[in-house]
Image (cartoon, rainbow, N blue to C red):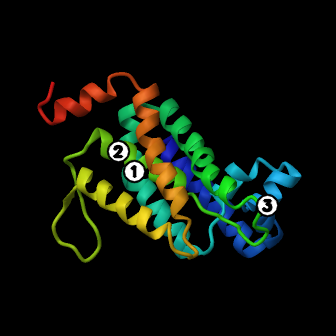
Amino acid sequence: MSVTISLIALNVLVSVVTLYAAPQLFNKFMMMPYRTVRQKTWYELVSSGFVHAGLGHLFLNMFVLFFFGLVLERTIGQGHFLALYFTGLIVSGLPSLYKEKDNPEFATVGASGAVEGVLFAFIFLFPLDPIYIMFIPVGIPAIIFGALFLAYSVYASRKEGRINHLAHIAGALWGLVYLIIFVPNTIDHFLTVFGLL
């Protein structure tokens, strides 16, 4: 069975259960850096990635995971894909963990960090493939979309808000780093796409 489909099924199951049947688990699974550091609940770096703030939040993450995850999984293999996803969950949570460790009000949930890792790994391997955004009828080359997304995330991370842009940035960068470190010939492939090798 596809790892991507299994991850989507697990995300949907855990998110729906914690939203509607067992809200006490929602609180237990979310990452609250103040609590994580003081109570040593390090599991929150992973568990927070399987709970979502609502069905819209869940759908958006799973939509992106479905369309880019299936291709990436076939390209780098199930083992690498699974490792990328779970290390992406952890790595994407670290900046917030450090920044908000003394803030008892801060909490974060969602698979966005891991999903951004998947998306940006796809972008690195298929930089010229078009990515389509709602209401824009023309595909944007993946590498341009990635650059614009990162620029926006850096800008938005400087403002207060409910979206954890730091997790998006860290997850996206980790997607690139993971490929370069662990997947052979990634840089050569990237250069070949642009005719530089």
Q: Check disc 1 and report the residue beneath it.
A: 119
Give the residue drawn at x 58%, y 75%: 162
- Of residues 5 and 118, the one drawn nearer to the viewer in this rendering: 118
Q: Can residue 112 be seen in this view?
A: no
> Helix, strand, or loop for circle 2?
helix
Q: Check disc 3 and report the residue beneath it.
A: 34
Distance from disc 3 to disc 2, alpha carbons, whole Å, reads 34 Å
Q: Marks 2 and 1: in contact by CB < 8 Å?
A: yes
> Helix, strand, or loop for circle 3?
helix
Amino acid on which the number 1 mark rests in the picture: Leu
Give the residue drawn at x 68%, y 54%: 97
Q: Callout 2: 10 Å neighbours few (<14), some, many (20+)? A: many
Indicate which label's residue lies in the foreground, 3 or 2: 3
Distance from disc 3 to disc 1, alpha carbons, whole Å, reads 29 Å
Amino acid on which the number 2 mark rests in the picture: Phe
x and y percentages locating residue 48 in the rendered image: 68, 58
Q: Marks 2 and 3: in contact by CB < 8 Å?
A: no
x and y percentages locating residue 81 in the rendered image: 48, 37
Give the residue drawn at x 80%, y 70%: 22
